[in-house]
Amino acid sequence: RSQVLRGVRQHLEQRHPLNLDFPMQTRGGALRWFNMRGAAERDPAGHPQRLSGSLHDITDQRRAMDISGTLEALEFSHDFYKRILDAIPIQISYIDKEQRILYMNESYERWFQLPLAAMRGRRISEVTSALRYKDTAPRVKSVLSGRTVEFEQRATRSDGSVRELAVNYVPHRDAHEGARLDMEHLDDRHGRD
C-alpha cells in the first residue's frame, strides 16, 4: 500500500509518470499482481484536480516472467557447468541406475570418438568390449548400491592405444526418483584424452 501511495504522491507532486506494478492480497488470501497507470488532470496553475487511470491484473504475465527468468537461469547454469566440465582434461560421465549414459564430457567424447548424442541412453555394456564390461560390471553395481569405488585400470582406446587409468566411481542420490546414479571419473596417467 505504501508503494502505491508513494508512487501516486510522486506523480502528483513531482510529475513522475504513474506506472506501478505492485502485489495485493485478495480477500481470499491469494496474492495477485496489478499494474496501475494514470495521469493527473491539472488546472491552469498546474495543481492536480483529478486523477484518472486504469488498474490491470498482471498476475499471469508476472508468473510467465518469473518462469522465463528461471529458465534463463537454468540455461545459463547448464552452459556454465558444461563449459567447465568440457575444459577438464579427464573423462567424466553420468550413468543412471539402469547403466545408461546420461552425460559425458568432451574428453569422454574424444575417448570414444563419438559425440554424446550418439552415446546418450546407451548402456555401458553396449559401448565397451565384453571383456571390459565383465571386469567393470561388479564395480558399477557396487557404486549403484551407494559405495564409492576407486581403482586403476589399463584400457585400450578405440584407436588401439593403451592407457593406464585411475578410475573413481562416485554414487549420487537422485532427489526426484531416489535412484542411485554413478559419475565416472577417469584420469589418464600417461596423457590426456
Image (cartoon, grey):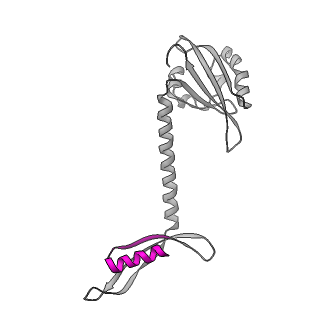
Q: How many marks?
A: 0
Horizontally, is 87 left or right of 189 in the view? left
Q: Which residue lies at the image location 51% right of the left edge and 52% below the top edge?
A: 70
The answer to whether 129 is drawn above or below residue 21 in the figure is above
Nearest the viewer among 36 and 148 is 148
Nearest the viewer among 97 and 130 is 97
Q: Which residue lies at the image location 67% right of the left edge and 43% below the top edge?
A: 175
Is residue 163 a member of the stretch shown in magenta? no
Is residue 2 a member of the stretch shown in magenta? yes
Q: Position of residue 49 (x, y in %)?
A: 34, 88
Q: Position of residue 97 (x, y in %)?
A: 70, 33
The answer to whether 162 is drawn above or below residue 112 in the figure is above
Q: Which residue lies at the image location 71% right of the left edge and 41% below the top edge?
A: 178
In this picture, which residue range is highlighted in magenta?
1-22
Nearest the viewer among 150 and 21 is 150
Q: Position of residue 144 (x, y in %)?
A: 71, 30
The answer to whether 2 is drawn above or below residue 129 in the figure is below
Q: Position of residue 84 (x, y in %)?
A: 48, 33
Residue most toward the left?
44
Horizontally, is 140 left or right of 92 in the view? right
